[in-house]
Amino acid sequence: MGKSTNRIYKGVDLNKGAILEEPVTIYANADIRNKVKIGAFTYINNGTTIFYNTKVGRFCSIGKKCEIGTVDHPISWLSSSSIQYNIAEHFDYKPYCKDFPQVHYEQIEGCTIGNDVWIGSLVVIKSGVTISDGAVIGANSIVVKDVPPFAIVGGVPAKLIRYRFNKETIEKLLDIKWWNRDLEDLAGIEFNNINRAIEQLGGVKKKDKLEAIRKRIPKSIKKPIKKILKKFK
Ligand SMILES: CC(C)(COP(=O)(O)OP(=O)(O)OC[C@H]1O[C@@H](n2cnc3c(N)ncnc32)[C@H](O)[C@@H]1OP(=O)(O)O)[C@@H](O)C(=O)NCCC(=O)NCCS
């Protein structure tokens, strides 16, 4: 096996059960828990915790001191304390802790972060939440609901500020899924000209061509074609 291309800085607590798709960079004092998956070209900044079972896509930029996939304690029980359901995690007070009766607590653990997501500093994302491809989370936000693709959200709780692009452009980007390509294939793309970049990535041209052909087909021919296609389904 060759040398890892991941960059892991000092003081990072990287659980052995975490899976990193190279290259990933994790800055100082980040805490990456068990069963976390992180996609290539994603970086996690200083002091951020990625909680158990969270999936992070490719090309994501995650700011400092974020808490991603935080777990809730029970709030309708006698106590919110984990002594009721997971005493061993925090305490070792023999002889009581070892045999202390535990109640099952169904926790939702982890969340899903898509590709090309930018998360600002000091963001908290609740477990169970899905942040879709291309989304942006403003600094200091608390995200409690799913965030749609290419949405910019912010605040406590986070609300929609606007979308990065118009609907048509978002559809094209979700169709192209450029983040699944090798970095080499992205060389020379005009990154700062979204329409040109989409064109260069090629996906749209094909789709637009098909659409143009479809538009040119007279209705009288469309119906019988649909009937034939149905037979093959
Ligand atoms: C979310 C963000 C990307 C928006 O940038 P922008 O489009 O230039 O935003 P604007 O300054 O034009 O603000 C647009 C609106 O969003 C609001 N807004 C901006 N950032 C916000 C935030 N973090 N939380 C809540 N609301 C926010 C503004 O108040 C404004 O609201 P209004 O229209 O009611 O007046 C940016 O403000 C941000 O938070 N960036 C993260 C910075 C960071 O943490 N960097 C760390 C390095 S990785």
Image (cartoon, grey):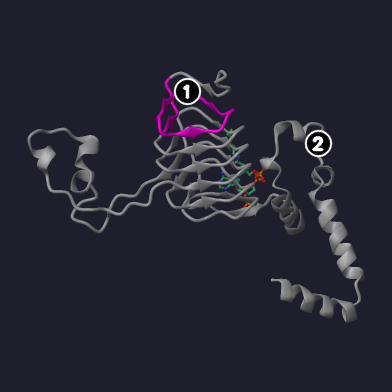
The C terminus, quarter of image: bottom right
Classify residue 201 by image quadrant: top right
Q: Residue at x 19, y 35 (%)?
A: 91
Q: Quadrant of the N terminus?
A: top right
Does the magenta segment cover residue 21? Answer: yes
Along the horizontal axis of the image, is 56 left or right of 30?
Answer: right
- From the image, tell me which residue sits under label 2: 189
Which is nearer the eye, 181 or 124? Answer: 181
The kind of residue on which mark 2 rests is Ile
Q: Quadrant of ligand 1?
A: top right
Point 10% across, 42% down: residue: 99
Label 1 sits on a secondary structure element that is: loop
Residue 89: within the magenta? no
Amino acid identity at mark 1 = Ala
Say if 9 sits above or below 156 in the image.
above
Q: Residues within 10 Å of mark 1 (few under 14, many from 20)?
A: some
Q: Which mark is residue 92?
A: none
Residue depicted at x 46% and y 53%? 144
Pick whichever of labels 1 and 2 is earlier in the sequence: 1
Is 17 left, or right, of 87 in this rendering?
Answer: right
- In this view, 209 is above or below 123: below
Residue 88 on image: x %, y %: 20, 38
The residues colored magenta run 11-32
Residue at image point 86% right, 67% down:
214
Name the residue tied to disc 1.
Answer: 28
Magenta stretch prevailing secondary structure: loop
Using residue 191 as the reference point, say whether residue 164 is left or right of it. left
Circle nearer the viewer, 1 or 2: 2
User: How far is mark 1 from mark 2, CA to CA?
Assistant: 32 Å
Q: Nearer the viewer, residue 193 or 208?
A: 208
- Relative image position of residue 14 (x, y in whole percent): 42, 28
